Amino acid sequence: MKLISASEMRELDRRTIEEFGIPGEELMETAGQGLADAIRKLAGNHQLVDAPLLFIAGCGNNGGDAFVAARILHEDGGIDEVWLAGSENKLKGDALAHFKRMKKAGVPFSTLETSNDWKNATACGNDAEIIVDGLLGTGATGEPRGVIADAVAFIEANTDRALVVAIDIPSGMAIRADLTVTMGLPKADLVQPENIDFVGNLDVIDIGIPPEYIEATKGEADLELIHPTDLAPLFPRRGRDMHKGAYGHVLCVGGSKGFSGAITMAARAAARAGAGLVSALVPDNIYAAVAPVAPEVMVHTFPDLGKVRDVFSNAWNSIVIGPGLTRSNPARDLVLRLLNESRVPLVLDADAIAVLANHTDEISAAQCPLILTPHPGEFAMLFGLKVEDVQADRLGMAHMAAAKLNAVMVLKGAGTVVAAPGKTAAINMTGNPGMASGGSGDVLAGMVGALAGQGIGLFEAACAAVWLHGRAGDLAAAEKSQAGLIAPDLIDKIPDALREVSCR
């Protein structure tokens, strides 16, 4: 999905109102309806359907979106209250019209016009479990001032005990939101590395901007957002006469004593991501640890890495190598053999990347389609860089690696970047800090292999796997908490994530 600037969004709004003839009040109603839907979904996922809900609104259009959503949720029986940061006299235009509709609907509201009002609010506290930030939008410049600054401080002080939903953009990029619901198209500022911790997850609401206007908007030249509407065509309806062979046979190679879980999770994730068949090739000494916990996977063994046979046959539609493989010389030799002899898509993950430090020429000369899924440390090791340098320019680094290696590059982390030669890079905004635990990357590797093995283009397969992986993590964290999240929880939620891009 195209990323645009705030000024480009204002121009799209103007054209839609003045040229296409949709009144601004109607656009705001649509935006507020989408916001209400997003809040319902968030509350449902976190088991907070009847939880107290507080809207904190400014006097501009962000406040107008909040008024619409508050009215809709109140009419549905939701428990909500609106605090206006400022005077009613400052409301005008579409925001004023929707404020009047909200009042007429009987939504409880209060005006907090002074700093003392906000000090009292802080002293008295609030029992809201979801707080909606509707203070400042993309048109605001500079740091928040006056009562808006007081309201921002109030919200930020409550982020440890309540979920925070930001409208369009976290106010002043000073509020740590769990979810940002942006209108029309995603704004480029929302995916900048320095802002990702404030934005949280990113939801985009279609407010009715004509497609031809969007198409004519330039947007960011070298980066797009991975969005479920773009992924849906990758998952067409499955024919009733299809069989397991129609959806790919994935081979997962790896594992070692003490690291049997890595290859097990990769293989199980591949199965959950829709692969028709999944095989795992593991050392003899961990067979008993893998086979009983992965009955859906065909587990084969080898005596040691130097004696692996038949890895490169035509039986597979994709190969994943690396999880738990070890960083030994025999492991390096095996990966180099695969690069030279495989003809099916190859996913290099974890140890399979680490052992190739100083072997980038061999990667670029690979005889097969290639996807690499490094975290920043593995990326730095591969290219002889410092991790901080990688993190300082994640987009540029991903582009460089994709071009140099002639491969799809998945640079993992908050705001995972997917790059490929000749393509606009893509950034992902699903996922959460609870996924920073052992095994999460193994799950992603298996998912990438499964989608590539089903015949989806490598770049598209990587983008889809990254989004689904993050979404599965979000669903798991909503149910089990971020702190309590473990990698197998992600595997269990892959089917639910898939349902968000395919009704079947």
Image (spheres, grey):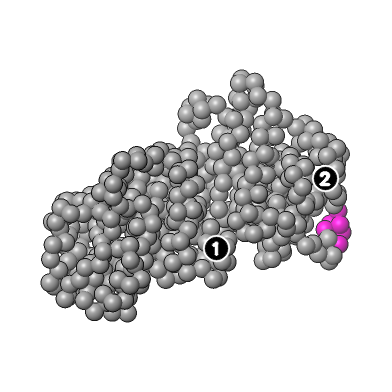
**The C terminus lies in quadrant:** top left
In the picture as drawn, the residue positioned furthest to the front comes out as 241
Q: Amino acid at mark 1?
A: Ala
Tag 2 secondary structure: loop
Name the residue at 71% across, 60% down.
Answer: 129
| Residue 258 part of the magenta-drawn span | no
**x, y percentage for residue 110?**
86, 50
Q: Is residue 424 visible?
A: no
Name the residue at 57% across, 55% down.
Answer: 200
Residue 132 located left or right of residue 255? right
* Residue nearer the viewer, 389 or 291: 291
From the image, give the main secondary structure of the stretch colored magenta: helix
Residue 402 located left or right of residue 95? left
Q: Is residue 367 visible?
A: yes
The Cα atoms of the two marked residues, 1 and 2, are separated by 31 Å
Say the numbered circle drawn on residue 477: 1
**x, y percentage for residue 449?**
31, 55
The residue wearing badge 2 is: 107
Q: Amino acid at mark 2?
A: Val
How crowded pointer 1 is (Cα within 10 Å; few <14, some 14-19, many 20+) is rated as many
- Please give the range of residues in magenta: 114-120
Residue 353: name its quadrant. bottom left
* Residue nearer the viewer, 370 or 79: 79
Residue 251: name its quadrant. bottom left
| Residue 116 part of the magenta-drawn span | yes
Residue 237: name its quadrant. top left
Say the numbered circle drawn on residue 350: none
**Picture layout, residue 298 above or below residue 85:** below
